[in-house]
Image: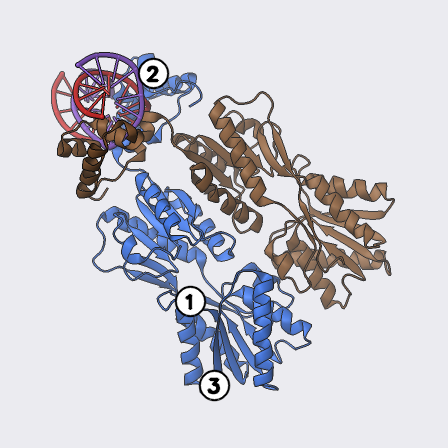
Chain colours: A brown, B blue, C red, D purple
Amino acid sequence: MTKKNVTYNDIAKYTGFSKTTVSRYFNNPNSVTSENRAIISDALNTLGYRENKVARILASGKTEFIGIIVPNLYLHFYAKMLDTLLSTYEKYGYKFIVFAGNDNKDEERRYLSELLAYKIEGLIMMSHTIPSSELARCGVPVVGIEREDENICSVNTDNYMGAVQATSLLIRGGCDHLIHINSDIDEKTPAYRRIRGFRDTCVSHRKEHDVTLCNFKNSYSEDRAELEQIIDRLEKKYPGRKKGIFTSSDTYANIILNILLRRGKAVPSDYMLIGFDNSPISEEAMIPISTIGQQSDIMADEAMSMLSELMEKGSTPAAPEHRIITPILIRRETTD
Amino acid sequence: MTKKNVTYNDIAKYTGFSKTTVSRYFNNPNSVTSENRAIISDALNTLGYRENKVARILASGKTEFIGIIVPNLYLHFYAKMLDTLLSTYEKYGYKFIVFAGNDNKDEERRYLSELLAYKIEGLIMMSHTIPSSELARCGVPVVGIEREDENICSVNTDNYMGAVQATSLLIRGGCDHLIHINSDIDEKTPAYRRIRGFRDTCVSHRKEHDVTLCNFKNSYSEDRAELEQIIDRLEKKYPGRKKGIFTSSDTYANIILNILLRRGKAVPSDYMLIGFDNSPISEEAMIPISTIGQQSDIMADEAMSMLSELMEKGSTPAAPEHRIITPILIRRETTD
DNA sequence: TTGTACGCGTTATCAC
DNA sequence: GTGATAACGCGTACAA
């Protein structure tokens, strides 16, 4: 945009061919003599041509844009997910316009309409604020990841199974009392199934258990203070019993681990501990923390393959398809 | 794109106005009667008009696109930086097309040319593979963040000052022997100045010191193994001396902390420890780790204000401007 | 194999 | 305040 843009027209004039031939040089090279291809190629170089995909979009109707809205990128899960999604460029060729909507519904609506104005061909939605009923009406294929997905296609971790695996591991480890700590989430979010998986497993094994829902602030000191109180209560209420704690995120598991170690508790003999996400902290903790690993590479790939299918078809499916990815149990030192 | 797109033409026919008036409704509303505005507004709703910015780009020449290439998003620094950059949408209105180039020069070149094809108005470059000499010739304003920046504008942390602060803290803490651990980086990268800052501070205080450059793999187990050996050597070489370790990243500081605690060393009395980045791990570690905090919010804002200035002017400045952001010393329990 | 003519949806420049 | 008309850069029938 600095100087004048070189266009097909310039190349055409310079070479004596028509714009059409220049266009064909790019889109259907075989229909141009190899000699003429060389001539055009030279002209492109000497004139310093730069392709303009914006014009191509207008003519062809294909933008090759996919919109992504993430809640944030300081939580490792979203960062990792976005990283993996961006890497699919090599395979699918779609370009990504990315927004981070910090849990603000109106902002995210603006992001969405901005994306639609740029004629994205598909949307990958990881934020929670806009209900799927609304997303389903936006006119482009949408795939949700780990969010409420009643009316849209989605890719989710098998949260229920993840919780079952985690809880079973604690039971096998000989814990007398099981605790699940989660934030106070909506029943419609996929992560809610972790609570169900925990409860069901405890019940079917006739294990004493608690579910504690907290109002986490995503601030280390505040969340730590809250978890300190929870540990206090547990110590008082169930003294001497071997406890197994399953948290909804590795971050909380790590905070609890730090609290326990500072109090001189033995992990895993007094307390067993398992988190969720396989985020770096789980591996880097003082005692490496067992966790449930979401397979973000597979999830990203499924999301993209699903989305590209939807974009091919053009029509939205009658019933939204939900793909469930089984998580992986990662056993480390807090349970073994 | 699902059905037929509603365009200005449709609105014009429906209302009896011309396309021009419809355009003015959006771009210069005051030049249209409020009654006619109402009529157009109704038509837009009933026909279900959706603006098409791609067409606007072609006509106006302004894409409002900024390209971002990050090396990856699993390192917290990049994720946080991207998060903050994306948030500037509220202030500047630019949309971001994002690529993650995994340290592959040819891939990143393709990303760059793809971005140029979409007529980005500016580029924010956080990857290291493409030399700034090449970036300077790409035809759009470029701002680099924490990378080699000889020929481009940039925003960097004052790495030298950060290292001076960190080293001084260790010295004030009474350490006898100082160690700096870094990866084997190029002298041209901003982070190299951490090494200089460490050395200069040690020399001016006449402190015994070592600089150890490692070949880190970004794998916990491998890096931990390497750091174990380094601690072994230190223990043998300088037994009984109080050691102060300054690492180039919080991740390494945390690994070292874990190693030391497992070996029964006392932190901060036997060893003092300070990292770099103020990443979550520094706060979440068993003993909260002192660190040098890069002010990523300020850096992102400077990068954007700089880039928007460059984009306004249109011309590249004769000499690239380098903005330096002073980092913040964060004192936690590994030094106090 | 190559060229002509038109369309994509908007903005800009004139007129009125 | 409003309307023709020509760009913007490229793709694509259709014709040659």
**Sequence-wise first label, 2 or 1:** 2
Q: Which residue is mark 1?
A: B185
Report whether mark 2 lies on the same chain as mark 1: yes
Residue sitting at 33 percent across and 61 percent down? Answer: B323
Task: Kindly state the secondary structure of the residue where label 1 is placed.
Answer: loop
> Residue A106: x percent and y percent?
49, 36
Assign the N terminus of chain B to one quadrant of the image: top left
Q: Which chain contains the residue that carries disc 1? A: B
Q: Is residue A70 or residue B234 the one in the foreground? A: B234
Toward which corner of the image does residue A81 lie, by quadrant?
top right
Task: Kindly state the secondary structure of the residue where label 3 is placed.
Answer: loop
Q: CA distance from mark 1 to mark 3?
A: 24 Å
Instruction: State whether residue A89 is above or below residue B5.
Output: below
Report whether mark 1 lies on the same chain as mark 3: yes
Q: CA distance from mark 3 to mark 2?
A: 78 Å
**Sequence-wise first label, 1 or 3:** 1
Q: Which residue is mark 3?
A: B207
Q: Is residue A14 or residue B9 the one in the foreground? A: A14
Residue sitting at 42 percent across and 16 percent down? Answer: B46
The answer to whether residue B173 is visible is: yes
> Residue A38: x percent and y percent?
21, 37
Instruction: State whether residue B149 is above or below residue B201.
Output: above
